[in-house]
Image: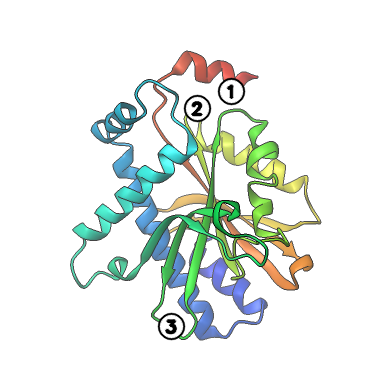
Amino acid sequence: MPLSQVLLDNLLEKGLSRTQAQRWLVFVCEAMQLLDDAARALNLDHHWAELLAKVDGRGVQEPDITTELYLHMERVQESEPLTSPLRDLHVKCEDPIAARNRAGRDTRAADLVVANFRSEKALRFVMEAKLLRTAGDIGRAYLGPDGMECYRDTDSPYSLHEVAGMLGYVRTETIETWHDRLRTGLHERMPLPVMSVGDVDLEPYGTECVYSDVSRQELGLVPLFLLHRILPFPNDEPQQEMANAAS
């Protein structure tokens, strides 16, 4: 089922007006299109080679991919016509999270944030990213305290909005394999904090994606619609990566 239909129904059930829900679905679809175009650009041989040159022989880490995605998102926006809605999106990388008890070096930061201020209440789509090397990274990192649980943290939750995202960067195996592992990990956390799990298709490319509704009872907020996006990238260290994935 298309993301736009699933998200609209989900937000209406949470009490948003139809106008608010429609703004969200248009905004999220635009943010996903921008992310998709940036990921396609980073996957091009010459752009990936540029990243490898920057890391100068060490292994590619999550922040390396995230910052390159951010740069490509900016380039995509600059290449769009002046009338394109993608130019209205504000993209930030390592954006500080507002907190009551944290400042300076103690402040936490979201990996990517896409915002739109053209409404009475600004819309912010926060995305936290993890590099997935082994099946165990789903439970330890992606769904753990520094992953999905960032949105439920009572100290400094990464988003107070109704919608947010999780990104999984993979360099081995197929997207379908990682989706199966993700679904298994999410189902193991039902009925709480995960309340439901499903699949959606992202427009305009028809890319399959997983979503979940995550309880935020501790924060006094409605459940969070969390869009899970698996992004594949080149594997330039096949023997090492395959050994890691099998462990």
**Contact flag, marks 2 and 1 (Cβ < 8 Å):** yes
Residue 224 location, x and y as percent?
Answer: 65, 65
Residue 36 location, x and y as percent?
Answer: 37, 51
Q: Earlier in the sequence, mark 2 or mark 1?
A: 2
How many marks the image carries: the answer is 3
- 61 relative to 84, above or below: above
**Contact flag, marks 3 and 1 (Cβ < 8 Å):** no
Residue at the (43%, 68%) spot, across then down: 115
Residue 143 location, x and y as percent?
Answer: 67, 45
Disc 2/disc 1 C-alpha distance (Å): 7 Å
Q: Amino acid at mark 3?
A: Ser
Q: Is residue 1 left or right of residue 83?
A: right
Q: Secondary structure at mark 2?
A: loop
Report the colour scheme.
rainbow
**Contact flag, marks 2 and 3 (Cβ < 8 Å):** no
Q: Secondary structure at mark 3?
A: loop
Q: Where the C terminus falls, by quadrant?
A: top right
Q: Amino acid at mark 2?
A: Thr
Disc 3/disc 1 C-alpha distance (Å): 44 Å
Q: Secondary structure at mark 1?
A: helix
Q: What residue is pinned by disc 2?
A: 172
Residue 167 location, x and y as percent?
Answer: 52, 47
Q: Amino acid at mark 1?
A: Ala
Q: What residue is pinned by disc 1?
A: 245
Hey, which quadrant is residue 109 in on the image? bottom right
Q: Is residue 47 left or right of residue 189?
A: left
Q: What residue is pinned by disc 3?
A: 119
Disc 2/disc 3 C-alpha distance (Å): 41 Å
